[in-house]
């Protein structure tokens, strides 16, 4: 039992250190180098301009190829870490450390601007709020949503905008054409993006929808 407990603690420490490393990597990529330190991935659609809407750097990806992948990973890491910090470490000295990492991780999640991941985060927080009977989590969600509406920066518009909806509808139509041509045997392993470029119609999109 002691051996298994020590092994479990070791896994938790390794997971926590991995979270710290990838979080630092994301901030370095976003704020300094423009490339992550682990795989040399560039920040997605990186641009550095200053205008009336504020300074905008693009989308961090850290050690992942796309910001959507980073946001999905952050969801898997952030929610357990934050829940342990808030509900299970009230008397632990490590609470300040895990809390600081959770806040840094959430800010990186905010910078990634992945709308689908925000929906997942909201639904997860609602589940946690009702299962733990914590009304303050619901109030926090309302506050964040209200702030995003009132503070109209380019970053918040990138998260909550619906401009890419037509792109996604077009992508669904193109995907259906690819499927309809070979509904039984398919088109082959890892050929979706090759076929997508053949079938897709030109779309007017200023956002580079869905990392394509």
Image: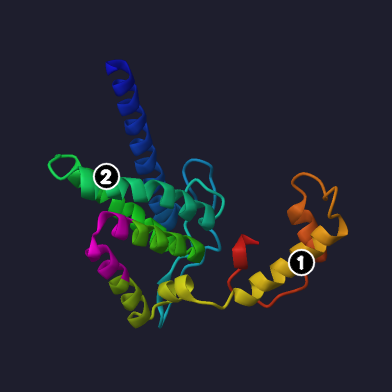
Q: How is the image coloured?
A: rainbow
Q: Hey, which quadrant is residue 207 in on the image?
A: bottom right
Q: Please tell me which residue lies in front, 62 or 132.
A: 132
Residue 59: x and y in percent read 49, 61
Q: Determine whether, in the image, residue 1 is placed left or right of residue 124.
A: left
Q: Determine whether, in the image, residue 159 is placed left or right of residue 127.
A: right
Q: Mark 2 points at which residue?
A: 84
Q: Residues within 10 Å of mark 1 (few under 14, many from 20)?
A: some
Q: Can you say which quadrant of the picture contains the C terminus?
A: bottom right
Residue stretch in magenta: 128-141
Q: Mark 1 points at which residue?
A: 174
Q: How crowded is mark 2: few (under 14 residues within 10 Å), some or many (20 or more)?
A: some
Taking the spot 39% from the left edge, 38% from the top edge, the residue there is: 18
Q: Determine whether, in the image, residue 10 is placed left or right of residue 159.
A: left
Q: Is residue 121 magenta?
A: no
Taking the spot 31% from the left edge, 76% from the top edge, the residue there is: 147
Q: Is mark 2 on a helix, strand or loop?
A: helix
Question: Upstream in the sequence, badge 2 or badge 1?
Answer: 2
For the view shown, which residue lies furthest in the left direction? Answer: 91
The CA distance from mark 2 to mark 1 is 43 Å
């Amino acid at each position: 039992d002691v051996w298994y407990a020590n092994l479990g603690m070791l896994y938790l420490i390794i997971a926590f250190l991995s979270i710290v490393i990838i979080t630092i990597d994301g901030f370095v990529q976003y704020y300094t180098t423009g490339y992550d330190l682990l795989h040399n991935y560039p920040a997605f659609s990186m641009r550095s301009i200053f205008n009336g809407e504020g300074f905008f750097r693009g989308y961090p990806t850290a050690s992942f190829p796309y910001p959507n992948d980073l946001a999905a990973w952050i969801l898997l890491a952030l929610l357990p870490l934050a829940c342990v910090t808030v509900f299970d470490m009230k008397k632990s000295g490590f609470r300040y450390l895990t809390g600081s990492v959770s806040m840094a991780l959430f800010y990186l999640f905010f910078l990634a601007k992945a709308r689908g991941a925000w929906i997942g985060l909201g639904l997860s927080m609602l589940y946690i709020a009702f299962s733990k009977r914590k009304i303050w989590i619901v109030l926090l969600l309302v506050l964040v949503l209200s702030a995003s509406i009132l503070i109209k920066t380019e970053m918040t518009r990138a998260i909550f905008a619906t401009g890419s909806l037509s792109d996604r509808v077009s992508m669904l139509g193109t995907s259906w054409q690819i499927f309809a041509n070979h509904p039984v045997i398919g088109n082959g392993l890892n050929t979706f993006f090759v076929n997508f470029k053949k079938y897709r119609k030109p779309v007017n999109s200023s956002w580079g929808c869905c990392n394509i």
